[in-house]
Amino acid sequence: MKVDRLETHDRWQHFLKQDFDIGANCQRMIDQRPFGPYPFYIFVHKRTIGEDERVSIFNEEFWKQISNPSYTSKYKSLEDVPSHRLIWQPRLTKPKAQPNSMLFKGYPGTNNVKIIWMLPDESTWEAYEKGKLTENKTVVESIVAYKTKRASLEAREEDDFDDEKIDGIYRDLAREAALRKFSTP
């Protein structure tokens, strides 16, 4: 089999870029301070985009191109529209560990991000092992922890708030949102 060195390099660069996108997305979320100054979890999980939503995305791109001739559509056909998306969810409580998810803990006012787990789709776990092109120590450690000590993966962190404090933060956020709603013309 012949390998096209330029194509292989491009794919490798794309793979490496994905790691940086994760860090940038985490930092963007930390900078938004969804819970004010309090540390929070960033739960990233993959979800399927329904066929109806994919059609809607494709149609939206089509109409953008029709209304603006200089606009170049991202999708040439419906098959080009992604079938999955990543959901980036800020949370005060730790979710259950699951494949196809990542969990980080962010600390507002800093660029500190604690990686708690990075679990890809189970069918790809082998690809992250030592000696493979996509070898990743963090992913392998997460997989081992998921398989052997899931309870510790899902356990509260030292700096987690108790349920009463979390409820108080949520009440404060709800109160602030209600005040903004009524004070905006």
Image (cartoon, rainbow, N blue to C red):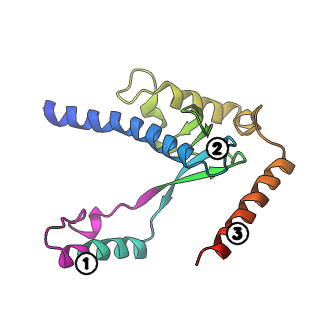
State how many labels appear: 3
Percent of width and height locating residue 122? 52, 43
Instruction: Give the amino acid type for the residue marked by disc 2 in the picture.
Output: Tyr
Label 2 crowding class (10 Å Cα cut-off): few <14, some 14-19, many 20+? many
Q: Which mark is residue 41?
A: 2
Residue 27 percent location from the top left of the image = 50, 40
Task: Tell whether label 2 touches label 3 (CB within 8 Å).
Answer: no
Q: Residue at x 44, y 57 (%)?
A: 85
- The N terminus appears in which quarter of the rendering? top left
Up/down of 185 relative to 46, above or below: below
Q: Secondary structure at mark 3?
A: helix
Residue under numbered circle 1: 63
Given the image, on which type of amino acid does mark 1 rest? Trp
How many C-alpha atoms fall within 10 Å of the one at disc 3: few (<14), some, or many (≥20)? few
Q: Which residues are magenta?
A: 63-85
List x then y, in percent, for residue 156. 77, 38
Depicted 69 relative to depicted 72: above or below: below
The quadrant of the image that shows the C terminus is bottom right
What is the CA distance from the residue labelled 3 to the residue labelled 1? 38 Å
Q: Nearer the viewer, mark 3 or mark 1?
A: 3
Say whether disc 3 or disc 1 marks the residue closer to the N-terminus: 1
> Please, what secondary structure does the residue beneath circle 1 have?
helix
Q: Position of residue 118 (x, y in %)?
A: 54, 37
Callout 2 touching callout 1 (CB < 8 Å): no
Residue 4 in view:
no
Is 80 a magenta residue?
yes
**Which residue is painted at 41% across and 35% down in the image?**
19
Which residue is labeled 3 in the image?
Answer: 179
**Relative to 32, 136 lies left or right:** left
CA distance separating discs 3 and 2: 26 Å
Q: Callout 2: helix, strand or loop?
A: strand
